[in-house]
Amino acid sequence: MKVSAVFVSIVAFAVTQVSANASIVRQYNALGATDQVALHNCLTNYRWDNWSGQDCGGRGWFKGSHNYKSPTNCYDACAGLLVQAINQGASDVECDDFEGGARCWMGFH
């Protein structure tokens, strides 16, 4: 029960963190079963620990940008959309966010 309460809190926070300029540009749900709890934990930790290119929750995570101000802004823009994708069983997903001419992207595969 305690774990599910924490999980619900994380999901509620992340869903509120969707930018109007962010969108899912790729989502596949058919590349194998995913451990949704592990992926949610990875996403939560990803905001503070920049471990792009490493595996977590059985998936390879990535994050990048072009002229984008801050990796945490990218996280804040995309986290809610990634939560939704994880909940839908995504095994490969990318979110992009745009700020003027700047772009960031993050996700897992």
Image: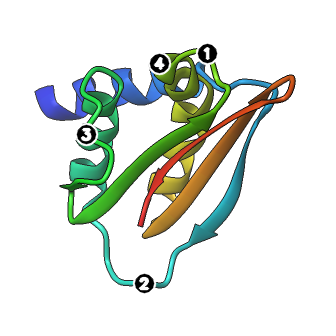
For marks 2 and 3, the one nearer the N-term is 2
Q: Is residue 25 above or below residue 79?
A: below
Helix, strand or loop under label 4? helix
User: Residue 61 in the image: x percent, y percent?
Assistant: 35, 53
Q: Is residue 96 above or below residue 67?
A: below
| Contact, mark 2 vs mark 4 (Cβ under 8 Å) | no
Q: Is residue 90 something that shows in the picture?
A: no
Q: Is residue 52 above or below residue 98?
A: below
> Whole-Å distance between the Cαs marked 4 and 1?
9 Å
Relative horizontal placement of residue 22, taking residue 83 as reference (left or right): right
Category of crowding for the residue at label 3, using alpha-carbon neighbours closer than 10 angstroms: few (below 14), some (14–19), many (at least 20) = some
Query: Which residue is under mark 4?
Result: 72
The disc placed on residue 51 is: 3
Q: Nearer the viewer, mark 4 or mark 1?
A: 1
Give the mark count. 4
Quadrant where the C terminus sits is bottom left
Helix, strand or loop under label 1? loop
Q: Amino acid at mark 4?
A: Thr
Query: Which residue is under mark 1?
Result: 69
